[in-house]
Image (cartoon, rainbow, N blue to C red):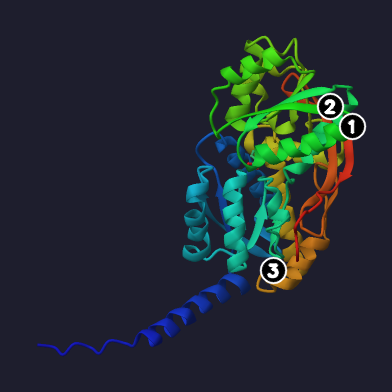
Amino acid sequence: MRTPRPLLPLTTLAVAASACLAAGAALAQGSGPIKVGLMLPATGTFAALGDMIEKGFKLHVQEQGGKLAGREIQYFRVDDESDPSKATDNVNKLIRRDNVDVIVGTVHSGVALAMARAAKESGTLLIVPNAGADAITGAQCAPNIFRSSFSNWQPGYATGVVAAGKGYKRAMTITWNYAAGNETVKGFTEAFEKGGGKVVKELSLPFPNVEFQALLTEIAAQKPDVVFAFFAGGGAVKFVKDYDAAGLRRTIPLVGSGFLTDGTLEAQGASAQGLITALHYGDNIETPRNTAFRNRFAVAYKANPDVYALQGYDAAQMLAAGLAAVKGDIGKKDALIAAIRKSQIDSPRGKFTLSAQHNPTQDFYVREVKGNYNVVTGVAVKALADPGRGCRM
Ligand code: BEZ
């Protein structure tokens, strides 16, 4: 019988394990591919949004020859299902299991809040390519957390400016009852009431429910001057069609933050025609930068880009700006963060800078649906900066 080998003391094992991890991390940071964790929805009402973000991000990387600052990019993917209850486990797959250098995600504000907590704790670089949760660049801000998209307050506020400017006085709002819906309505109310209007009633339903009928009946009974809605993805398609089918489109004007009609127009068809929204992107921005972006996207994917593709593309541009400053050495975190913070991003939406809290300061456009396009008809607010309430960095 063989004598069993003595067991190594636990402390020795722990030291050996952390040495291996450190060696792995050094390898990931100084040489070899940069590990990018894409945490996006691949299923559910926001699946198409996640797909567009990924396509946009990869398009910019492809334009750079598949490398950023000379480093290959290796992708790791997690489907977050737009489910906040699974978010911490999902993000830890990328942080602990895959040991990624940077996380790009996500769409849903509730999921993104959990991701921001994990990123803050671990120090992993996080670039949010959609979710607008105000706290991410507010009370939960951190040096290693950036956003390439917007805060929920921003498009809500811009739409409030537009609605007040049209002379509407009594508004009703309707949305999903979660961070994105509630914060967007808050931004709308702030600007609309500053402009002389009054929000007379707020309606909501749980995310991602689409049983709108009872709420539409209430709108018809109250007869406000205007309805403001925040919905996106599959939910936005259903809402716009139901609003039209209930006969409300012709009697009570519907406005929304631009997610109501972005990436949705083919499915919404006639029901969306003429809708007015406000957003930081539109389909017909006639600059060489936007034209080139749209052409390359169409060639690569045989589809038109939308706001989500744009935000994914700009997330890659932000990462590229940081990596260029440190010549690809992602281990030089402070210098990389400082470079992203100071960068001016040459976005197809128009150039933008980042606020002290790491959120884009950007123009918000007025758009009108014509055919399958959100056509820019003016600027709602120029260089709109999120207030960054509660951020201490
Ligand atoms: C959000 O949850 O933050 C969100 C989702 C879709 C579109 C815009 C915002």
Q: Along the line of sight, which residue is nearer the eye, 264 or 346?
A: 264
Residue 328: numbered disc: 3
Neighbours of disc 1 within 10 Å: few (<14), some (14-19), many (20+): some
Residue 195: numbered disc: 1
Q: Quadrant of ligand 1?
A: top right
Circle 2/circle 1 CB separation < 8 Å: yes
Helix, strand, or loop for circle 1? loop
The residue sitting at 77% across, 54% down in the picture is 389
The residue sitting at 62% across, 45% down in the picture is 109
Residue 163: numbered disc: 2
Give the amino acid at mark 3.
Gly
The residue sitting at 16% across, 90% down in the picture is 3
Circle 3/circle 1 CB separation < 8 Å: no
Helix, strand, or loop for circle 3? loop
Give the amino acid at mark 2.
Ala
Neighbours of disc 2 within 10 Å: few (<14), some (14-19), many (20+): many
Instruction: Kindly indicate the quadrant of the structure image that contains residue 103.
Output: bottom right
Q: Along the line of sight, which residue is nearer the eye, 75 or 249?
A: 249
Q: Along the line of sight, which residue is nearer the eye, 344 or 190?
A: 190
Q: Along the line of sight, which residue is nearer the eye, 240 or 316?
A: 240
